[in-house]
Image (cartoon, grey):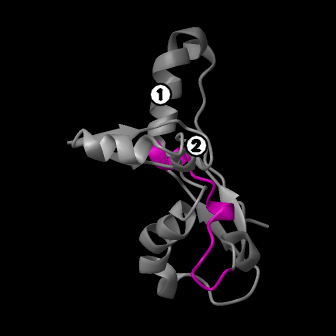
Amino acid sequence: DPMLWFHGTPGARQQLPPDTHRQALERGLRIIGVDRPGTGNSSAYLYDVLIEPVRAALPATPDAPLTIIPHGPLFRVSFAGLPSRRGRYLLEDYRLHYAPSAGAFGVAFFAFGALYARHAASFAASPFAR
C-alpha cells in the first residue's frame, strides 16, 4: 500500500527518520515523498513538461520578452527559476513578464464585484507597446 508524505518543505522526502523506510517495508507500506515544485529535481521536470514542448516556438533572440499567463495551480510555479536540462534558468534566456489569466479576473469579479460594481472598468495592455 502506498503512503504519501506531503511535508511541504524543500527536501521533505529526506526528512523522514532514517529507519522509517525499513519499518514501512516490514509493514507492507511504500512511502512516496513529494517535494513541492522548485525543489529537488521537480523544477527540471516542470521545465520538461511546460517549456520544452513549446521551446521551438519561443523567440530565439537572447533576452527576448516572454509573457507567461499561468492558470490554476500553475499560478504558484516560479517560471523564472525553472532550470533546463542544459542548466540554464528560464530567466537567463528571456525577459519574463507575467499576466493574470482570465480566471483570475473572474475570481476578482465575484469576490469584489458587489463592492466596485458602480466603478468597474476593464482594460487590457501590452507590455510591448511603445
Q: Earlier in the sequence, mark 2 or mark 1?
A: 2
Residue occupying the point 54% across, 40% down = 17
Secondary structure, mark 1, is: helix
**Rendered view: 106 above or below 120:** below
Q: Find out whether residue 86 is within the magenta segment.
A: yes
Q: Residue at x 51, y 82 (%)?
A: 55
Is 50 placed above or below 92 here?
above
Left or right of 30, for residue 111: right
Residue 109 left/right relative to 91: left
Tag 2: amino acid: Gln
| Residue 83 vertical position relative to residue 114 in the rendered view, above or below | below
Query: Which residue type carries mark 1?
Result: Val
Which residue bears the numbered disc 2?
15
**Residue 2's quadrant in the figure?**
top left
Magenta region includes residue 27: no
| Coordinates of residue 11 in the picture (x, y in percent) | 60, 50
Label 2: which secondary element: loop
Question: Callout 2 environment at 10 Å: few (<14), some (14 to 19), or many (20+)?
Answer: few
**Residue 129: x, y in percent?**
73, 65
Q: Position of residue 90 (x, y in %)?
A: 66, 72
Please indicate, yes or no, whether residue 18 appears anywhere in the rendered image. Answer: yes
x and y, in percent, of residue 107 in the image: 47, 27
Quadrant of the frame with the C terminus? bottom right
Q: Is residue 126 visible?
A: no
Which numbered dot is residue 95? Answer: none
User: Disc 1 marks which residue?
Assistant: 107
Q: What is the CA distance from the residue labelled 2 to the residue labelled 1?
A: 37 Å
Q: Is residue 83 above or below residue 43?
A: below
User: Badge 1: few (under 14), some or many (20 or more) residues near its Cα, within 10 Å?
Assistant: few
Please give the range of residues in magenta: 72-87
